[in-house]
Image (cartoon, grey):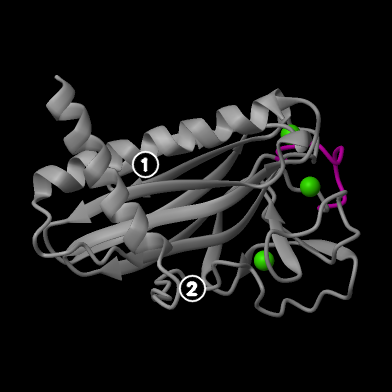
Amino acid sequence: MLLKKIKFAAAALTVSAFLASPGMAATNFVVNGGFEDNVGLGNNSWNVFDSIPGWTTTSGRGIEIQRGNGIGGASPYEGLQKVELDSHNLSGSGSKNDNSNSGMQQLLTLGAGTYEFSFAYLGRTKDANSNGIGYSLMNGILNDMVTGVRKDGWTIISHIFSLDEKTEIAINFWAKGKEDTLGGYLDNVQISAVPLPAALPLYGAGLAAMGFIGWRRKRKQAAAEA
Ligand SMILES: [Ca+2]
Ligand SMILES: [Ca+2]
Ligand SMILES: [Ca+2]
Protein backbone atom coordinates (compact mmCIF):
# COMPACT_ATOMS: atom_id res chain seq x y z
CA MET A 1 0.00 0.00 0.00
CA LEU A 2 2.77 2.38 0.96
CA LEU A 3 4.67 1.48 -2.20
CA LYS A 4 1.61 2.29 -4.30
CA LYS A 5 1.34 5.70 -2.72
CA ILE A 6 4.95 6.51 -3.44
CA LYS A 7 4.58 5.47 -7.09
CA PHE A 8 1.44 7.58 -7.39
CA ALA A 9 3.18 10.68 -6.05
CA ALA A 10 6.19 10.17 -8.31
CA ALA A 11 4.06 9.87 -11.46
CA ALA A 12 2.06 12.98 -10.61
CA LEU A 13 5.21 14.93 -9.88
CA THR A 14 6.85 13.94 -13.14
CA VAL A 15 4.00 15.22 -15.29
CA SER A 16 3.47 18.32 -13.14
CA ALA A 17 7.13 19.19 -13.56
CA PHE A 18 6.87 18.85 -17.34
CA LEU A 19 3.75 20.99 -17.54
CA ALA A 20 5.20 23.64 -15.29
CA SER A 21 8.62 23.86 -16.93
CA PRO A 22 9.31 27.42 -18.04
CA GLY A 23 10.32 27.86 -21.65
CA MET A 24 8.18 24.93 -22.77
CA ALA A 25 5.35 27.03 -24.15
CA ALA A 26 3.09 24.38 -25.64
CA THR A 27 0.97 25.13 -28.70
CA ASN A 28 -2.64 25.87 -27.83
CA PHE A 29 -4.90 24.05 -30.31
CA VAL A 30 -7.97 26.07 -29.30
CA VAL A 31 -8.79 28.98 -31.63
CA ASN A 32 -9.39 32.25 -29.78
CA GLY A 33 -9.24 30.43 -26.44
CA GLY A 34 -8.63 33.70 -24.58
CA PHE A 35 -11.53 35.42 -26.39
CA GLU A 36 -9.24 38.28 -27.38
CA ASP A 37 -10.13 38.38 -31.10
CA ASN A 38 -11.59 41.76 -32.06
CA VAL A 39 -15.39 41.78 -32.01
CA GLY A 40 -15.67 45.57 -32.19
CA LEU A 41 -16.06 46.31 -28.49
CA GLY A 42 -14.77 49.53 -26.93
CA ASN A 43 -13.13 49.53 -23.52
CA ASN A 44 -15.43 48.64 -20.60
CA SER A 45 -18.28 47.51 -22.81
CA TRP A 46 -19.99 44.23 -23.64
CA ASN A 47 -22.30 42.64 -26.19
CA VAL A 48 -23.87 39.28 -27.06
CA PHE A 49 -22.83 37.49 -30.27
CA ASP A 50 -24.21 34.56 -32.30
CA SER A 51 -20.64 33.66 -33.09
CA ILE A 52 -17.12 34.93 -32.46
CA PRO A 53 -13.93 33.67 -34.11
CA GLY A 54 -13.62 29.96 -33.24
CA TRP A 55 -16.91 29.67 -31.31
CA THR A 56 -20.61 29.38 -32.19
CA THR A 57 -23.73 29.60 -30.03
CA THR A 58 -25.46 26.25 -29.35
CA SER A 59 -28.27 27.43 -27.05
CA GLY A 60 -29.71 30.52 -25.37
CA ARG A 61 -29.05 34.15 -26.31
CA GLY A 62 -25.48 33.90 -27.44
CA ILE A 63 -21.91 34.44 -26.36
CA GLU A 64 -21.52 37.47 -24.11
CA ILE A 65 -18.10 39.09 -24.39
CA GLN A 66 -17.03 41.65 -21.83
CA ARG A 67 -14.06 43.91 -22.59
CA GLY A 68 -12.04 45.83 -20.00
CA ASN A 69 -10.98 45.61 -16.38
CA GLY A 70 -13.90 47.61 -15.04
CA ILE A 71 -16.77 45.63 -16.52
CA GLY A 72 -18.90 43.07 -14.67
CA GLY A 73 -16.97 43.54 -11.42
CA ALA A 74 -13.93 41.45 -12.41
CA SER A 75 -10.89 41.75 -14.65
CA PRO A 76 -10.32 39.06 -17.27
CA TYR A 77 -7.95 36.24 -16.35
CA GLU A 78 -5.79 37.24 -19.31
CA GLY A 79 -5.91 40.01 -21.90
CA LEU A 80 -8.86 42.38 -22.05
CA GLN A 81 -11.82 40.12 -22.85
CA LYS A 82 -13.68 37.30 -21.08
CA VAL A 83 -16.88 35.34 -21.75
CA GLU A 84 -20.04 35.12 -19.64
CA LEU A 85 -22.63 32.57 -20.78
CA ASP A 86 -25.54 33.86 -18.72
CA SER A 87 -26.13 36.22 -21.61
CA HIS A 88 -28.43 39.23 -21.65
CA ASN A 89 -31.56 38.89 -23.80
CA LEU A 90 -31.12 41.76 -26.25
CA SER A 91 -33.84 40.57 -28.65
CA GLY A 92 -36.18 43.42 -27.77
CA SER A 93 -38.95 41.18 -26.44
CA GLY A 94 -39.32 39.55 -23.05
CA SER A 95 -37.21 40.21 -19.97
CA LYS A 96 -33.43 40.40 -19.96
CA ASN A 97 -33.42 37.00 -18.20
CA ASP A 98 -35.44 35.09 -20.81
CA ASN A 99 -33.47 32.05 -21.95
CA SER A 100 -30.30 33.81 -20.83
CA ASN A 101 -28.36 30.62 -20.00
CA SER A 102 -26.42 30.04 -23.21
CA GLY A 103 -24.03 27.50 -24.68
CA MET A 104 -21.14 27.66 -27.10
CA GLN A 105 -19.02 25.21 -29.05
CA GLN A 106 -15.74 24.88 -30.91
CA LEU A 107 -14.82 21.96 -33.18
CA LEU A 108 -11.22 20.96 -33.67
CA THR A 109 -9.32 17.91 -34.85
CA LEU A 110 -6.47 16.47 -32.82
CA GLY A 111 -4.01 13.70 -33.65
CA ALA A 112 -3.29 10.72 -31.42
CA GLY A 113 -1.60 11.73 -28.19
CA THR A 114 -2.02 12.92 -24.64
CA TYR A 115 -3.40 16.40 -24.03
CA GLU A 116 -4.21 18.80 -21.25
CA PHE A 117 -7.52 20.66 -21.47
CA SER A 118 -7.74 23.67 -19.18
CA PHE A 119 -9.60 26.92 -18.69
CA ALA A 120 -9.93 29.74 -16.19
CA TYR A 121 -13.24 30.07 -14.33
CA LEU A 122 -14.65 32.72 -11.99
CA GLY A 123 -18.15 32.86 -10.47
CA ARG A 124 -19.50 36.38 -10.91
CA THR A 125 -21.97 36.56 -8.01
CA LYS A 126 -22.18 35.47 -4.36
CA ASP A 127 -24.67 32.75 -5.38
CA ALA A 128 -23.10 29.52 -6.58
CA ASN A 129 -26.55 28.46 -7.86
CA SER A 130 -26.33 31.22 -10.46
CA ASN A 131 -22.73 30.83 -11.58
CA GLY A 132 -22.44 27.27 -12.91
CA ILE A 133 -20.74 26.35 -16.16
CA GLY A 134 -21.08 22.87 -17.63
CA TYR A 135 -18.38 21.71 -19.99
CA SER A 136 -17.64 18.71 -22.15
CA LEU A 137 -15.20 17.33 -24.66
CA MET A 138 -17.21 15.24 -27.05
CA ASN A 139 -17.64 12.55 -27.93
CA GLY A 140 -17.60 11.15 -24.42
CA ILE A 141 -14.11 12.19 -23.34
CA LEU A 142 -15.26 14.47 -20.56
CA ASN A 143 -18.50 15.88 -19.15
CA ASP A 144 -18.35 17.93 -15.97
CA MET A 145 -19.33 21.25 -14.42
CA VAL A 146 -17.85 23.92 -12.21
CA THR A 147 -19.35 26.55 -10.00
CA GLY A 148 -18.08 28.94 -7.39
CA VAL A 149 -18.48 32.44 -6.03
CA ARG A 150 -16.68 35.71 -6.60
CA LYS A 151 -14.46 35.56 -3.55
CA ASP A 152 -12.91 32.29 -4.79
CA GLY A 153 -11.09 34.27 -7.47
CA TRP A 154 -10.12 32.83 -10.85
CA THR A 155 -9.63 29.04 -10.69
CA ILE A 156 -7.84 26.90 -13.27
CA ILE A 157 -9.76 23.76 -14.21
CA SER A 158 -7.53 21.11 -15.76
CA HIS A 159 -8.06 17.63 -17.20
CA ILE A 160 -5.68 15.23 -18.94
CA PHE A 161 -7.00 13.03 -21.76
CA SER A 162 -5.57 10.73 -24.42
CA LEU A 163 -6.61 9.94 -27.98
CA ASP A 164 -5.74 6.68 -29.72
CA GLU A 165 -6.21 8.15 -33.18
CA LYS A 166 -6.96 11.39 -35.04
CA THR A 167 -10.27 12.59 -33.58
CA GLU A 168 -12.66 15.49 -34.06
CA ILE A 169 -13.26 17.07 -30.66
CA ALA A 170 -16.19 19.33 -29.78
CA ILE A 171 -15.49 21.65 -26.86
CA ASN A 172 -18.77 22.72 -25.27
CA PHE A 173 -19.49 25.18 -22.48
CA TRP A 174 -22.98 26.03 -21.21
CA ALA A 175 -24.39 28.14 -18.39
CA LYS A 176 -26.21 26.37 -15.53
CA GLY A 177 -28.40 27.51 -12.66
CA LYS A 178 -30.45 30.64 -12.17
CA GLU A 179 -31.11 32.65 -15.35
CA ASP A 180 -30.44 36.22 -14.27
CA THR A 181 -27.84 37.47 -16.82
CA LEU A 182 -25.12 36.99 -14.16
CA GLY A 183 -23.11 33.79 -14.25
CA GLY A 184 -19.68 32.23 -14.54
CA TYR A 185 -16.80 33.84 -16.38
CA LEU A 186 -14.54 31.89 -18.74
CA ASP A 187 -11.11 32.77 -20.09
CA ASN A 188 -7.91 31.19 -21.39
CA VAL A 189 -9.33 27.92 -22.81
CA GLN A 190 -6.44 25.70 -23.82
CA ILE A 191 -5.74 22.26 -25.22
CA SER A 192 -2.05 21.48 -25.44
CA ALA A 193 -0.02 18.35 -25.97
CA VAL A 194 1.51 16.86 -22.84
CA PRO A 195 5.13 15.93 -23.54
CA LEU A 196 5.13 12.69 -21.60
CA PRO A 197 8.60 11.23 -21.36
CA ALA A 198 8.82 8.02 -23.37
CA ALA A 199 9.86 6.13 -20.27
CA LEU A 200 6.62 6.93 -18.45
CA PRO A 201 4.23 4.04 -19.14
CA LEU A 202 0.53 4.58 -19.75
CA TYR A 203 -0.02 3.15 -16.29
CA GLY A 204 1.83 6.17 -14.91
CA ALA A 205 -0.13 8.59 -17.10
CA GLY A 206 -3.38 7.28 -15.66
CA LEU A 207 -2.10 7.80 -12.15
CA ALA A 208 -0.89 11.25 -13.10
CA ALA A 209 -4.35 12.20 -14.36
CA MET A 210 -5.72 11.10 -11.00
CA GLY A 211 -3.07 13.25 -9.41
CA PHE A 212 -4.34 16.24 -11.33
CA ILE A 213 -7.87 15.69 -10.16
CA GLY A 214 -6.52 15.67 -6.62
CA TRP A 215 -4.62 18.85 -7.33
CA ARG A 216 -7.74 20.54 -8.66
CA ARG A 217 -9.72 19.55 -5.57
CA LYS A 218 -6.96 20.89 -3.37
CA ARG A 219 -6.96 24.19 -5.21
CA LYS A 220 -10.70 24.54 -4.84
CA GLN A 221 -10.57 23.59 -1.21
CA ALA A 222 -7.82 26.12 -0.55
CA ALA A 223 -9.85 28.79 -2.33
CA ALA A 224 -12.96 27.96 -0.28
CA GLU A 225 -11.01 28.36 2.93
CA ALA A 226 -9.47 31.69 1.91
CA1 LIG B 1 -9.07 36.86 -22.31
CA1 LIG C 1 -27.03 33.06 -13.55
CA1 LIG D 1 -24.41 38.47 -18.70
Residue 95 located within the stretch drawn in magenta: yes
Residue type at the position of mark 2: Val
Give the side of residue 154 with respect to residue 124, left or right. Answer: left
Residue 125's image quarter? top right
Q: Disc 2 designates what residue?
A: 31
**Res. 212 mark:** 1
State the image coordinates of residue 34 (x, y, percent, origin top left). Answer: 60, 67
Q: Is residue 136 magenta?
A: no
Q: CA distance from mark 2 to mark 1?
A: 24 Å
**Magenta segment:** 91-100
Locate residue 51, reporting x and y percent.
61, 66
Tag 2 near tag 1, CB within 8 Å: no
Q: Left or right: 11 with respect to 155?
A: left
Q: Which is the main secondary structure of the residues drawn in magenta?
A: loop
Mark drawn on residue 80 = none
Q: Nearer the viewer, residue 44 or 218?
A: 218
Q: Is residue 118 above or below residue 81?
A: above
Task: Name the element at disc 2.
Answer: loop
The residue carrying pointer 1 sits among few (fewer than 14), some (14 to 19) or many (20 or more) residues within 10 Å by Cα, namely: some
> Left or right: 84 with respect to 44?
left
Residue 105 relative to residue 209: left or right = right
Task: Check the picture and name the quadrant holding the C terminus.
Answer: top right
